[in-house]
Image (spheres, grey):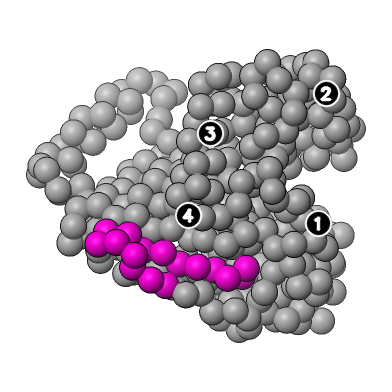
């Protein structure tokens, strides 16, 4: 293992992206998100994604230099068209405008359309939360999840994220999870480690429950909580694809494939001012937080979440990143 600081993760990622054709500002935004994922232990969305970013920059599957186009089609709606570029700079280009709008109107919608995968959805809602607003986000991905009772891949892991401000520039509550029973990357990691997976995560290609990660990768994932998670997954699909004019999960190839058409995925964010109807939001939140804290072993999602200053990176992965940066 190599012990790398988060600053080194950021610098190496930005250098790798620039070396493969990304613009300076675009590379910085993606590198910032990559470093954030590593700092919070989300390795699936961290350095493991950098090689695919570089390969897709090389093939043209993602445009690393395009500038997003930001418009305001409705009074409380901001649209950032990524134009087949990275999601991170598209969000950054519209974030402050959307936050200002939510403070003025009480609620605002921010849509990112036609983008590369956003990778970690909670990275974006966290920024909304730290700006003092409630942020709720939705996105979709390549199809890997079957409907309950079915076996055909229809929707992606389709995450939902929510960040709630604490009134002091931090977060009182934060979660980011897929509406599938598990992220696809965890099954791939189990395969590489030669481990089995729990029942309830996936189905084989015949629609039967399986503990074999290889069979699961040939088959489909289950929704979290059965039909309940399936409903949330469909909600995320409609919010991310139908509301933004981006593609359905059915029309997206594998997110890490080097070649192919651009992802053209969407993300939808709802921004809400906690003072729109009452000045009691903080009081009610504290009442809830205190009750949970009094229950030994329980906690609010995201409570005491601390970013690491340095992380352990597998030697082979770090060597690959440095090679890509040359």
- The answer to if 75 sits in the magenta stretch is yes
Pointer 1 or 3: first along the chain: 3
What is the C-alpha distance between the residues marked 4 and 1?
24 Å
- The location of residue 66, given as percent across then percent down, is 60, 79
Q: Nearer the viewer, residue 282 or 140?
A: 140
Residue linked to disc 2: 204
Residue linked to disc 1: 257
Q: Nearer the viewer, residue 65 or 290?
A: 65
**4 and 3 marks in contact (CB < 8 Å):** no
Pointer 4 or 2: first along the chain: 2
- The answer to if 63 sits in the magenta stretch is no
Pointer 4 or 3: first along the chain: 3
Residue linked to disc 4: 244
Residue linked to disc 3: 234
Point out the stretch of residues depicted in magenta. Answer: 70-85
Image vertical order of residue 323 relative to residue 241, above or below: below
**4 and 1 marks in contact (CB < 8 Å):** no
Numbered disc in front, either 4 or 2: 4
């Amino acid at each position: 293992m190599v012990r790398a600081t988060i600053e080194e993760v950021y610098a190496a990622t930005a250098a790798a992206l620039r070396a493969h054709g990304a613009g300076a500002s675009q590379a910085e935004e993606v590198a910032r998100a990559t470093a954030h994922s590593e700092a919070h232990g989300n390795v699936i969305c961290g350095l493991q994604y950098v090689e695919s970013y570089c390969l897709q920059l090389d093939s043209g599957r993602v445009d690393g230099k395009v500038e997003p186009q930001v418009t305001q089609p409705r009074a409380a709606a901001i649209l950032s068209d990524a134009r087949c570029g990275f999601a991170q700079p598209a969000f950054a280009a519209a974030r402050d405008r959307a936050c200002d709008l939510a403070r003025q109107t009480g609620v605002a919608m921010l849509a990112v359309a036609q983008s590369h995968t956003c990778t970690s959805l909670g990275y974006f809602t966290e920024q909304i939360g730290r700006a003092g607003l409630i942020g709720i986000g939705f996105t979709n991905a390549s199809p890997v999840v079957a409907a309950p009772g079915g076996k055909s891949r229809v929707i992606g892991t389709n995450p939902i994220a929510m960040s709630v401000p604490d009134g002091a520039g931090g977060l009182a509550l934060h979660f980011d999870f897929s509406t599938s029973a598990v992220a696809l990357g965890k099954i791939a990691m189990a395969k590489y480690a030669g481990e089995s997976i729990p029942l309830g995560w996936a189905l084989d290609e015949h629609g039967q429950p399986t503990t074999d990660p290889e069979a699961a990768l040939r088959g489909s994932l289950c929704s979290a909580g059965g039909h309940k998670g399936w409903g949330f997954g469909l909600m995320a699909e409609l919010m991310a694809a139908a509301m933004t004019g981006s593609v359905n999960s059915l029309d997206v190839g594998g997110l890490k494939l080097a070649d192919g058409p651009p992802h053209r995925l969407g993300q939808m964010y709802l921004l809400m001012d906690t003072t729109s109807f009452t000045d009691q939001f903080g009081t009610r939140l504290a009442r809830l937080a205190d009750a949970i804290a009094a229950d030994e072993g329980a906690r609010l999602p995201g409570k005491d979440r601390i970013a690491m200053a340095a992380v352990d990176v597998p030697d082979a992965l770090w060597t690959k990143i440095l090679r890509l940066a040359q």
